[in-house]
Image (spheres, rainbow, N blue to C red):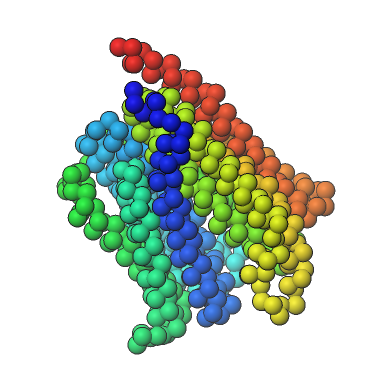
Amino acid sequence: MLSAQMSYPAHVRAILVLGLPLVGGHMAQMGIGLTDTIMVGWYGAEALATVTLATTLFMTLMLAGSGFAWAVMPMVAKYHAEDDDQSVRRSTRMGLWLSALFCAAVFPLLWWSEALLLMLGQLPQVASEAQLYLRILVFGLLPALVTMTLKSYLAALERTQVVFWVTAVAVPFNALANYALIFGNFGFPELGIEGAAIASLSTHLFSAAVVVGYILAFVPEHSLFQRIWKSDWDMFATVFRLGWPIGLTTLSEVGLFAASAIMMGWLGTIPLAAHGIALQLASMTFMLHLGLSNAATVRAGNAFGRRDMPHLARGGAVALTLSALVALLTIVLFVSLPEPLISVFLDPDDPARADIIATGVILLVLAALFQLVDGAQVVALGLLRGIQDARVPMVLAAVSYFGVGLPAAYVLGFGLGWGGAGVWSGLVIGLAVAAVLLNHRFWFRMIPGLSRLAAPAANA
């Protein structure tokens, strides 16, 4: 089989062609969030606190529902490799259905969010204003998940440049909408945090319109939106079974880092500020690994559809090697230039600047340590999703993050008195355990098992 004879350099080219636009798309998505933070911060510290709280709740729920969007990617990749256009259409439609049903289920939580936030110990004024913000943004959840689902569909068809441009054009749109509606520019009224919510809602609607318009114009062969109301319960169940564990896996990793932020807050404002800066830098480099992971999902899904196990194994090895090379470059950067990197985020006249930099340097060295294992675990997750293995990885990830990483962070940070360095050492340990367990499952459980299944078919 030709694909089984594909050389390692060819695999590298294929993964980079797929992965680099996806990396760019993830970076652009981060740019949208960064723009929101900066512009709301310009409006006022209280507004920033309110919007930060509201968007944290919104993003948590969105990530919980994102599993159905992510599930579409390996399924479409597999069906596309099998030339099964009908199943491509069916799986994508049911991904959209499940996203819509999820939005309906969580709508009350966002609409009446003030009560929830008060239960979590937030200040009444902040909780009230956060609910005002969320009662606007709640209508952006469906277009946001629709966009994610359709991006997964396009990525699986290897149209990743479109995925990048859909996100990239949203960055200036979002910036202009924020500038106009928060501050009252271009003849618009000054709406403050309500303007920020309307701008975010508008950006989600704009992105969904762009991606739907592209599919209607340039991917008509799947007739994706014709009779979209027609039920397909068998495929609905298939997408659901794959999607819910993916969503919970994503949520568990986000929960690990959210819990680490809470623990850093217990240590004081300076450790928390240093944590925020180091995590922002680590998140930017993580986008490189996430893009490679997405590309690995598509390539693995294609190989899985063709029952081509040599291609699957070789492609997986290349994806992990590329991730390791990215990690090594990042390690060199973080270890050799920690102070200049941290200084970018700080006011030169800030009296706490020196203390934040001193703490941040230590955290950035630890961030360098977890680059290798963080990349390895997310690429392994991508490969496992490509072969539609999600439930056991969900359990392995949860055990690693909450059974190992979180307790280690608490014990090292507070039990042994290591402070912020201890909390971050716990993150390194949790991610390292996840990397080992997930890679062991892919290489020593799934690859041998799939190879045995594929052998009779190849000999038939």
Is 119 positioned to the left or the right of 391 in the image? right
Which residue occupies 18% across, 48% down?
220
Q: Is 222 placed above or below 448 here?
A: below
Quarter residue 137 falls in: bottom left
Q: Nearer the viewer, residue 18 or 298?
A: 18
Q: Quadrant of the C terminus?
A: top left
Closer to the camera, 13 or 312? Answer: 13
Residue 361 vertical position relative to residue 197 in the rendered view, above or below: above
Could you tell whether 331 is left or right of 117 in the image? right
Residue 165 appears anywhere in the view: yes
Q: Residue furthest right?
A: 416
Query: Is residue 252 at least partly visible in the picture?
Result: no
Residue drawn 54% across the image and 38% down it: 320
Q: Quadrant of residue 386?
A: top left
At 41% from the left and 67% from the top, the residue drawn is: 171
Instruction: Say left or right for 312 vs 289.
Output: left
Q: Measured from the top left, where is residue 46 in percent x and y?
A: 57, 77
At which x and y percent is residue 129?
50, 74
> Quick check: 119 above or below 80?
below
Q: Position of residue 173 (x, y in %)?
A: 37, 71
- Rendered-image quadrant of the N terminus: top left
For the point 42% across and 56% down, which residue is it?
Answer: 25
Q: How many marks?
A: 0
In x, y percent, where is residue 323? 55, 43
